[in-house]
């Protein structure tokens, strides 16, 4: 299994220059911070926070099909008790293989909307957990900056179905680019003075 995963990652990286020459755009992001909720509440994996660093990918412009790969995502989930409404830490970990496949059905330059599916795998905490995963399928929308053959995602909203280590949930989440978040905070601080 480890060898197959390694070769799949090598093939993806090797294909990036080929796609970039044939009418594709490179997508890049410094990182994201986000929050989400998994429904129904009152069981494991209720509230989710996540933090990612450096994601990159390709979107082929004829079909608007694309993928994004991120080598580092930190995720924590909390669970709630319906009787007292108190949230407590359930699980946290870092995933090293995070792949998102999507179809952008909009032809608008700075916005995207469409179905997607993603997998988060190779979770580490103190050891590597080969049996832990997060599979997601749904619809995503967001805003991005578009330059010549380069796209930079600013924020994304997602909704759909999520399977976390065998537990199925419906979910909704939002994430914002770290650079956008820090610029907004700095701009807000300057305006308030």
Image (cartoon, rainbow, N blue to C red):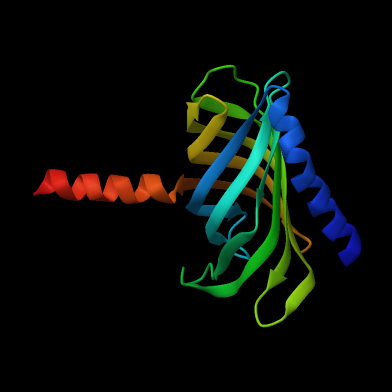
Tell me if residue 1 can be seen: no
Is 22 above or below relative to 161? above
- The part of the image, by quadrant, that contains residue 165 is bottom right
Q: Position of residue 157 (x, y in %)?
A: 53, 40
Residue situated in front as seen by the camera: 189 or 42: 189
Q: How many marks?
A: 0
Is 139 above or below relative to 168? above
Residue at x-position 62% and y-position 54%: 40
Q: Position of residue 166 (x, y in %)?
A: 79, 62
Q: Position of residue 55 (x, y in %)?
A: 59, 49
Query: What is the quadrant of the N terminus in the image?
Result: bottom right
Residue at x-position 81% and y-position 52%: 10
Residue situated in front as seen by the camera: 31 or 50: 31
Residue situated in front as seen by the camera: 59 or 172: 59
Of all residues, the one furthest to the left in this rendering is 193
Residue at x-position 55% and y-position 60%: 48
Residue situated in front as seen by the camera: 31 or 44: 31
Is 23 above or below relative to 56? above
Is 55 above or below relative to 112? below
Of all residues, the one furthest to the bottom in this rendering is 126
Residue at x-position 65% and y-position 26%: 104
Tell me if residue 161 can be seen: yes
Left or right: 29 with respect to 169?
Answer: left
Left or right: 43 with respect to 117?
Answer: left
- The part of the image, by quadrant, that contains residue 38 is bottom right
Left or right: 148 with respect to 182?
Answer: right
Q: Position of residue 147 (x, y in %)?
A: 49, 27
């Amino acid at each position: 299994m480890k060898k197959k995963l390694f070769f799949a990652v090598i093939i993806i990286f090797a294909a990036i220059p080929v796609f970039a020459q044939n009418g594709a755009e490179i997508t890049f992001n410094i990182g994201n911070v986000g929050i989400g909720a998994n429904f129904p509440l009152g069981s494991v994996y209720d509230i989710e926070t996540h933090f990612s660093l450096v994601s990159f990918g390709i979107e082929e412009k004829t079909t608007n099909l694309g993928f994004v790969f991120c080598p580092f995502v930190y995720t924590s989930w909390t669970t709630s008790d319906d009787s007292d409404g108190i949230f407590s830490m359930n699980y946290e970990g870092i995933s090293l293989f995070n792949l998102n496949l999507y179809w952008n059905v909009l032809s608008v330059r700075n916005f995207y909307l469409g179905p997607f599916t993603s997998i988060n795998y190779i979770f580490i905490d103190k050891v590597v957990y080969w049996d832990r995963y997060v599979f997601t399928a749904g619809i995503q929308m967001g805003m991005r900056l578009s330059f010549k053959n380069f796209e930079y995602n600013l924020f994304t909203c997602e909704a759909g179905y999520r399977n976390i280590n065998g537990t199925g949930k419906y979910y909704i989440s939002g994430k914002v680019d770290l650079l956008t978040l820090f610029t907004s905070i700095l701009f807000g601080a300057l305006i308030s003075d």
